[in-house]
Amino acid sequence: MDRRNFIRVAGLAGGGMLLSGTVLAQPKQLKAILGEQAAEEIEPTRELAYFVKIDADNNIRFQLTKHEMGQGVNTGLAMILAEELCADWEKVQIEFIGFDQRFSYGTGGSTTILDMWQPLRKAGATARQLLLQTAARRWQTDIANCTADKSIVINTLTKARFTFGELAAEAAQLPVPENVKLLSESEVPLKDAKAFQLIGKSLKNKVVPQMVTGKYRYSMDAKVEGMRYAAVARCPVFRGKLKSFDASAALRVEGVEQVVPITGIDAGSPGFPFFVRDGVAVIADSTWAAMQGKKALKIEWEDSVNSQYDTATFQAHVAGRMDGATEPRGVIGNADAVAAAAKKLTADYVYPYQAHVFMEPLNCIAQHRGDHAEVWIGTQSPVYIVNEVEKHFGIAKDRTTVHLFPSGGGFGRRYYPDAALEGLLVSKAAGNIPVKVVWSREDDVQTSHYHIYYHGHYEAGLDDKNNLIAWLHKEARTYWGSVEEGEISWNGYLIPNKRYDFVNMQPESALPSCAWRSVIANGWAFGQECFLDEVAHAVKKDPLQFRLELLREDQDLEVHHNYKLSTHRLRRVLQLAAEKANWGKRSKAGFGKGIAVYPYMHGNGYCAQVAEVSVRNGQLKVHKVVCAVDCGHVVNPDLVKNQIEGGVLWGMSALLYGGVEFENGQVLNSNFHNNRVVRMNEVPDIEVYFVENPGERPWGVGELAPPPAVPAIANAIFAACGVRVRKLPVRPESLVDH
Amino acid sequence: MQLKLRINNQTYEVDTPAEMPLLWVLRDKLDLTGTKYGCGMAQCGACTVLMNGNAVRSCVLPVASVQNQRITTIEGIATDGKLHPLQEAWIEANVPQCGYCQAGQIMSAVALLQNNAKPSEAEIKTAMAGNICRCGTYQRICQAIQQAAEAMD
């Protein structure tokens, strides 16, 4: 029997129906993102699940089994279900539930909507069918005379009506049609897209009212009986060790109760590691007292290999490792075509370490209870937590309870269990008491995990007619160190010879790296789209025209991924962005436009952006960014626009201000004054346009906008003043004479 | 130190170190967790509350200094169950993504509109520049403030 995509109904105590089901997350998808070994370790054959309650009072509770971190999945997912169910949207409530160990709640890679689209539609349609059957039986009429709309079933002949709530308990007793359980076959019709009443509309995000009244609870707001507060002084150098500490002054701070050391953990898997650092924890009766106590600690740390690095020497180290000869991982055409080309261009691009600095610093409440454990946390992957707790504390998975919360930003960082593991270490050291560990902003900036340090080396080969015939991309990066044979970066241009080489810098990373929104696509898009502009400039072609010529044929390219890379989809977003941005219109003196396009393959979405900037008197101003998005069927246009707008600013922050600096292995940035992000008074006008995709399913958007934003703006800077940005962040002194 | 605090038209008595910032008194002692910690050094605005109608960053405000001042937090701007026009506008414009910075944004906006009932876009951007949104909802914040200003006219 096919275990996949099971739909179940059951009665609820107090009347009503529980509609639930499971979906086997496409293992190949997860593997494409995480690598085979990591995927198996983190989410081994765990199914996704959904739970919906149709109550006797006719309200509908959509129980969220994914992490809400600002993408709006709570509402997007509920809309899909409510559409096919024919529910009254006003009656749909979002419920945040605890972690059901049987399933995966893993959220990331821009896959939530695309994974749940079909299963939720089937589930909604099935429940609708059961409600119609129940009404038909009560009215002793043919089911063809019954229609469902806005949580009511109507008898079209007699105009009699039942609410869903009145029917739900009885409907829950009906057998789910056998063949509905299988994704590939169904007796239950799904709506035609033309009949959608909810999907495609910009419905309001259901959790916003709680947010604007201060009622929305993050784990930072949680309290537990008997809880103490903890602040941890973590080793400032990656892989360093605690040597000794003097807690006497800390213990004299009012409110401080204990000071305990913790020993770090090397966790995760070889291709996907993460770390808890050695540290000293101050336990107190308030967050403030814990923070003050931490300031009074005197600690000696042992150096590590990373103590030798500062920003410049690490950059040089990576550049040196790039110099060695490498064999290609992926090749299209001839691997030596660049070397043999009549003309060559070359450039190097660096996208350095970045901090996430989401607004809710990491935190958790944790209690180690000997043979079981309890954690309260906002996490992108509770299953990763229970797996790692079992590995490192010997507590069986089903003996770790994870209480879930939405978060004040995940962006990949909250996928990792390090904060939870550290919380349990502190709890255990403090005598198995519940402790709330709060990371200060300084902790977050200085002792976290960081976006990949990326060095991309590019070479282009031209023939004697200036056609771009060969492309070499060689990459050194400090994360996702295992690259399979045949892998190639996401270059969708029709260049007959392409080569991708890889240098694994993960073992030598000066700072621990992890996923940071859009991950590898950031460096890839920056280097590719800026270098392509350099080539266009060298052959005196307009950047848009140059790209369109390289995308002139419809082809679906193999890039060693679940999905093929479509030249057609690249071309369409390019043309839409260029049209809406008035690309052909000449800019005034000191102004310039730049264009870039990139797919986000894990979500199978495409985005092109045209940025307009000015550089005058050495001052850079980003005036406008026009985005064209192909994300398939748009479930909620306004929620998607919010993601794209935010993603543009995410990229812009990295371009203008990003880059973590370090000295003797210690991060120098500490807070928002020296780890800046774009503020309200610097925001460009951002416009978002969608490519029409009739009949298409939805694709992912969370990580779609940051990668092309950086090269679009960088290319605009070149157009405005002739300065090439090859390393982030833009150095203001480089613009001084412009 | 025993202190009497006047918050959202209610009187609270707390026993706390005099130098504990108001932010942590609100959050840890009074369970008013709508006001958020984001940076601890008045750089991000997530901790913004009103003191006698003026926007202040509660993370750097020692609690002893606010005794007998009128403090308003996000929990206190709706009146008799009716949302403040800014809260309505925030919902209407679908402003938040993760939502964590938004209480601070709204409190700064309340103060802005109290001082300037019809701010220009440039005035809004300047007044709100102290509130960081990492998710990037700035365009919508600006729009919501303009909408609320209209509604309050």
Image (cartoon, rainbow, N blue to C red):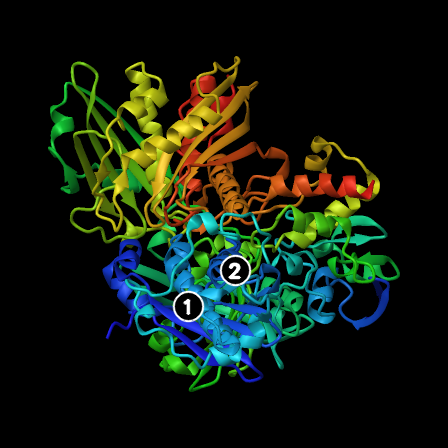
Q: Picture coordinates of residue A617 (x, y %)?
A: 57, 18
Quarter-of-image position of residue A725: top left
How would you rate the neighbour count of disc 1 (Cα within 10 Å): few for under 14, some for 14-19, many for 20 or more?
Answer: many
- Which residue is found at the position 47% from the left and 67% from the top? A128
Q: Nearer the viewer, residue A322 or A546?
A: A546
Q: Say what amino acid the circle numbered 2 marks.
A: Asn
Q: Is residue A170 left or right of residue B142?
A: left
Instruction: Point out residue A724 in the picture as x, y percentages from the top left corner.
Output: 40, 24
Q: Is residue A426 visible?
A: no
Residue farthest front in this picture: A157
Q: How many angstroms separate mark 1 from mark 2 (CA)?
A: 21 Å
Residue at the spot of label 2: A74
Q: Chain of mark 2?
A: A
Q: Residue furthest bottom?
A: A371
Q: Which residue is mark 1?
A: A126
Quadrant where the C terminus of chain B is found in the figure: top right
For the residues labelled 1 and 2, say whether their Cβ atoms are less than 8 Å apart. Answer: no
Counting labels gives 2
Is residue A491 depicted above or below A394 in this figure?
A: above
Q: Which residue is the extreme one toward the right?
A: B68
Name which residue lies at 52% across and 60% down: A74
Note whether A369 is above or below A536 in the view shown.
Answer: below
Circle 2 SS class? helix
Q: Position of residue A218 (x, y in %)?
A: 58, 64
Could you tell which of marks 1 and 2 lies nearer the N-terminus? 2
| Nearest the eye: B121 or A135 | A135
Task: Using the image as rendered, state which of residue A362 and residue A533 is in the foreground.
Answer: A533
Q: Chain of mark 1?
A: A
Nearer to us: label 1 or label 2: 1
Q: Amino acid at mark 1?
A: Thr
Q: Is residue A495 left or right of residue A672?
A: left
